[in-house]
Image (cartoon, grey):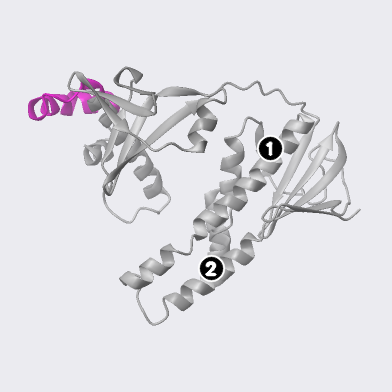
Amino acid sequence: MVEYAVRHGASQATLHKVFYAKFRREHPWLPTRLIKGAYRDATRRAKSFRAAKKRGKAYTEMPEVRHVTLTFSDAQDWRLEGGALKLRIGGRWVDLRCSSHKQLHRYLYGGWRLTEELKLKRRGKHWVAYLTFKRDFDVDPDPRNVVAVDVNENDVTAAVFVGGVLREVWRLETGLGRMVIAYAERRRKIAEGRHTSDREVGTKLKRLRERRRKLDVVRKAAKFIERLAEEHNAVVAVGRITQRAKEKMEEDKGMRLRHRIHQWSVRTLVRLLEEKPIQVVEVSEAGTSSRTPSGVRITFSPLVIRTAVRGLTVDTK
């Protein structure tokens, strides 16, 4: 079904016309809403694959489905109550015991509400449930209040403008550039003289936790910027660095420099900020080193240095 969606650019309605009778014939006990969930999952995979292929990031002719996924697109077929996940399959309810998590409690009892969709993915002997929560926020920032964000390799600078006037400047020391170099050297030593497909090498590489550590630092930086924007009722302005722009930066560069540019976390930070209940605007970076978001020429030095990794604050006034 995924391959059909890729080849024909099929919508959910088209997949229903082509595959519904086959599903009904081969799996008569399968709920109709679960079949519709399969259509939704297939169209999403096809859309993601076509986008990756357009960017030159697809390495196969067709997408590979590595994990079994069940999508319940209607809340009538599932519910979460009593510490258990209940599914309606074949006309009866089935209880699935699930392990709780503090993040789940935070959303369940923090003013968020569940959406209609539930995803179940097979991970070895276990099933992982993906729940989606939503919440309405009233975001109405003052357009003259701006938090201008500049993302560099090892730090993130946030300049706060209130009423068009520079109020304060924060520099968050992330150390992501040094982290990328250190992990690249560790991977080189682990795989020296051996191929990465080697089982022992693969096990050691998985234990490095590079992606998790970098994402943790970027999340802390995004949270700090969110607090600044909420405190000053401001718009967050970040430089417009697209994936294509990063690829152009990598052209004609050495292998190590290409790797450092590729690992630059600017797009990840923008994505995390856009998920926050704040207004984020991407602007051209031309002239932003010498002018405010209002167009006024400025000269300043950082007033406060904040280390995002260790959570330390050093006042340099």
Q: Position of residue 16 (x, y in %)?
A: 21, 24
In this rendering, position of residue 74 left or right of residue 287: left
Tag of residue 42: none
Magenta part of the chain: 11-33
Q: In this view, does 162 lie to the left or right of 28?
A: right
**Residue 272 in the image: above or below residue 217:** above
Which of these two is toward me, 69 or 56? 69
Q: Can residue 295 be seen in this view?
A: yes
Q: Identify the residue position indicated by label 1 in the image.
A: 226
Mark 2 neighbour density, 10 Å: few (under 14) some (14–19) many (20 or more): some
274 with respect to 236 (left or right): left
Q: What element carries label 2?
A: helix
Instruction: Give the Cα separation between the discs numbered 1 and 2.
Output: 29 Å
Residue found 55% across the figure and 56% down from its top: 213
What type is the residue that disc 2 sits on?
A: Tyr
Image quadrant where one finds the N terminus: top left
Residue 253 is at least partly visible in this image: no
The image quarter in which residue 8 lies: top left
Q: How many labels does the image show?
A: 2
Instruction: Name the residue type under label 1.
Output: Glu
Q: To which quarter of the image does residue 276 belong? A: top right
User: Callout 1: 10 Å neighbours few (<14), some, many (20+)?
Assistant: many
Task: Specify which label sits upstream in the sequence, 1 or 2.
Answer: 2
Q: In this view, does 220 lie to the left or right of 30?
A: right
**Pick the front one: 132 or 166:** 132
Q: Which residue lies furthest to the left in this view?
A: 25
**Residue 21 shown in magenta:** yes
Q: Which of the two residues, 203 or 193, is positioned nearer the viewer here?
A: 203
| Residue beneath the point at 73% across and 34% down | 229
- Prevailing SS of the magenta stretch: helix
Residue corresponding to mark 2: 183
Expressed as whole percent of the image width and height from the top left, the position of residue 227 reads: 72, 37
